[in-house]
Image (tube, rainbow, N blue to C red):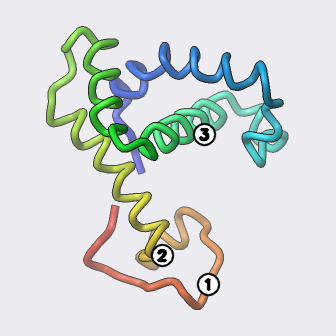
């Protein structure tokens, strides 16, 4: 799954403020379960932090609008609306798939999801 790099870059200033605040009260290891495994890989660590930040933001009732506004503001309205919508939709789709345990066989392999009898496999609803 490839995320739009412009949207990710636009999130970084607000994301950094968020994590500075969080990490003052909680150690990073208590927030990111596999931190010791990924701390030496800057790209993997950054993608994990972006993923966590977006998912926490989307839990709020106005999370989609908030994310859209953050990306738009930090990019000075230079990112196309369709790109932003696709970026946010990707995260919403992943959350839906996680909630309802609907994965394709390809996704099960790519994301290294362990087999669970409750998982519904699908070929129509893929990322």
Q: Position of residue 46 (x, y in %)?
A: 60, 30
Left or right of 94 in this view: 73: left
Q: Measuring 36% from the left and 38% from the top, which residue is drawn there? A: 63
Query: From mark 3 to mark 2, how far is it between C-alphas?
Result: 21 Å
Q: Is residue 50 above or below residue 121?
A: above
The quarter of the picture where residue 121 lies is bottom left
Tell me: 29 left or right of 81.
right
Q: Earlier in the sequence, mark 3 or mark 1?
A: 3
Of badges 3 and 2, the one in the foreground is 2
Label 3 SS: helix
Q: Quadrant of residue 39?
A: top right
Between 44 and 79, which is closer to the camera in this rendering? 79
Q: Residue at x 33, y 29 (%)?
A: 66
Is there CB contact under 8 Å for labels 2 and 1? yes
Q: Which residue is mark 1?
A: 116
Question: Which residue is at a point 51% across and 83% down the rendered structure image?
Answer: 119
Q: Label 3: few (<14), some or many (≥20) within 10 Å? A: some
Label 3 sits on residue:
48
Could you tell whether 103 is left or right of 112 in the image?
Answer: left
Residue 101 numbered tag: 2
| Mark 1: secondary structure | loop
Q: Earlier in the sequence, mark 3 or mark 2?
A: 3
- The first of marks 2 and 1 along the sequence is 2
* Residue 38 x/y as whole percent: 75, 39
Percent of width and height locating residue 79:
21, 21
Q: CA distance from mark 2 to mark 1?
A: 9 Å
Find out whether the residues at labels 3 and 1 contact each other: C-beta distance under 8 Å.
Answer: no
């Amino acid at each position: 799954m490839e995320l739009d790099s412009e949207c990710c870059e636009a999130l970084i200033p607000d994301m950094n403020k968020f994590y500075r605040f969080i990490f003052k009260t909680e150690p990073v290891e208590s927030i990111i379960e596999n931190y010791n495994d990924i701390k030496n890989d800057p790209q993997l660590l950054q993608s994990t932090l972006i993923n966590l930040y977006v998912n926490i933001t989307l839990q709020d009732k106005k999370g989609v609008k908030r994310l859209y506004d953050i990306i738009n503001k930090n990019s000075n309205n230079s990112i196309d609306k369709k790109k932003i919508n696709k970026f946010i939709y990707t995260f919403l789709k992943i959350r839906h798939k996680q909630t309802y345990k609907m994965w394709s066989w390809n996704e099960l392999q790519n994301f290294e999801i362990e087999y669970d009898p409750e998982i519904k496999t699908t070929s129509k609803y893929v990322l």
